[in-house]
Amino acid sequence: MITSFYMPTRIVAGPGALATIGTLARDLGMSRVLVVSDPVISAQGFHAEALAALAEAGIAVARFDECGIDARCSYIDQQGERVRREGIDGVVCVGGGSVMCTGKGIAIVATNRKPMAECTGVGRFDRKALPMIMVPTTAGSGSEVSQWTIVKDEERHLKLLGGGPLSFPDAALLDPATLRSLPMHVAALPAVDALTHGVEAYLSGIASPLTDAVALAAVRLQQASLRASITADDDRARADNLVASCMANIACGNARLGHGHALSLPLEGQLDLPHPYGVGVLLPHVMSFNLAVLPEKVRPLAEALDVETAGLSRQEMIAACAEAVRALYADIDFPDRFTAEQLPRDRVREMAARAVPGLYAGIAAQGFDPATAHDRTVIASPAARRMTVRQAEEIFERCL
Ligand SMILES: [Fe+2]
């Protein structure tokens, strides 16, 4: 199998990294930027510091502070048009995954001159996105080093992934100061998403020694830093967890994501379930499902999750991995089941069928009729093990 590993984003990490944003923007040739954020983040002190550093470097600033829970196609299309109209030559995102996905979408449509929905799928546009600087304010999505944006097509109730090598951010600034004001319940969600990225990259059918090295190191660092970064006032843990979530995304950017993300997608699109709940609740189940066909990967993953493996059979280690994840969830107050509202029992079959096109289909998923899926239809996914609609249904049932 031929594999490739590509990660062109410059990563500047550590306390004080945010102060370099002005010179970084100048180095990237930016003169007038759109700073993308949300109403909560744009009221924080570090946001004002970023704006001041940009101004000091002689960069003109326009702002869009209206991002919400999802990266909405309508916002992206409007702002992409604005960027062209106002001669903006760079996008700076200060926020979590939705902010970064919104900004990345704006950078894509600004140069490609077509609506965001038409840019979804893999490599569906041919012009390089505008230069981007990402400042993640949660340790989670890893969007700061990702070529992908996950957007919501509000009209069609679809969550869609789009991107390719032309939409990598140019720089990521990882400063633990941006995480300080996060309440625990807010910080836990993206952290769980990041853990899912590391594990799913490791369990991918297109994983390579390069992606495995990064994925395992990410899981190990997450296991060591995630609890303290959320439950304690610990800047060192926050800094480690930011780097860990970034590494997890570098791994899954190259090895891609598996069943957790494929099965979560219809829950997010149809039932408005926030992404981390979908992938996080599914994680222990899809992890066990795939480890069953990857015997050589069980022990390294168990050790990265800090499982005491001595004397355990392989089967016991797989169970212990799932238990380690659940124990972590308990410590950070994250659920390990869906509520009846999040996933109504009478919609389980439909959701399993809707997962068939997989995470990477983009707008092509629009033409898929879930009624055509039968028990043995396979969910499109790069994960190591084939999963049928029936098996997806069983996994959903176990999550209730
Ligand atoms: Fe994710």
Image (cartoon, helix red, strand yellow):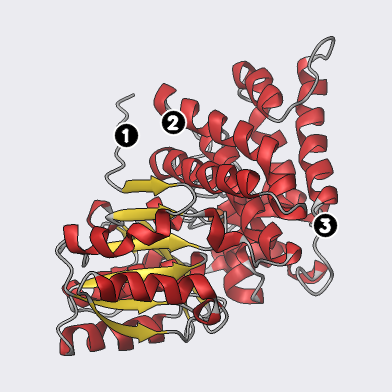
- SS at mark 1 in the image: loop
What numbered label is drawn on residue 333? 3
Residue 51 in sight from this viewpoint: yes
Left or right of residue 324, residue 157 in this image: left
In front here: 34 or 290? 34
Residue with the mark numbered 1: 5
Vertical relation: 112 (above or below) 248: below
- SS at mark 3 in the image: loop
Residue with the mark numbered 2: 211
Q: Earlier in the sequence, mark 3 or mark 1?
A: 1
Residue 1 location, x and y as percent?
34, 24
Does the numbered disc 1 mark a residue whose Cβ is under 8 Å from ligand 1?
no
In the image, what residue type sits under mark 2? Thr
Residue 52 location, x and y as percent?
35, 75
Quarter-of-image position of residue 173: bottom left
Give the alpha-carbon distance from disc 1 to disc 2, as whole Å.
8 Å
Q: Earlier in the sequence, mark 2 or mark 3?
A: 2
Badge 2: residue crowd in 10 Å (few <14, some 14–19, many ≥20): many
How many labels sit on residues? 3
Residue 384 in sight from this viewpoint: no
Figure quadrant, ligand 1: bottom right
In front here: 263 or 10? 10
Quarter-of-image position of residue 298: top right
In the image, what residue type sits under mark 1? Phe
Residue 146 location, x and y as percent?
39, 53
In front here: 261 or 215? 215
- Name the image quarter holding the C terminus: bottom right
Give the alpha-carbon distance from disc 2 to disc 3, as whole Å.
30 Å
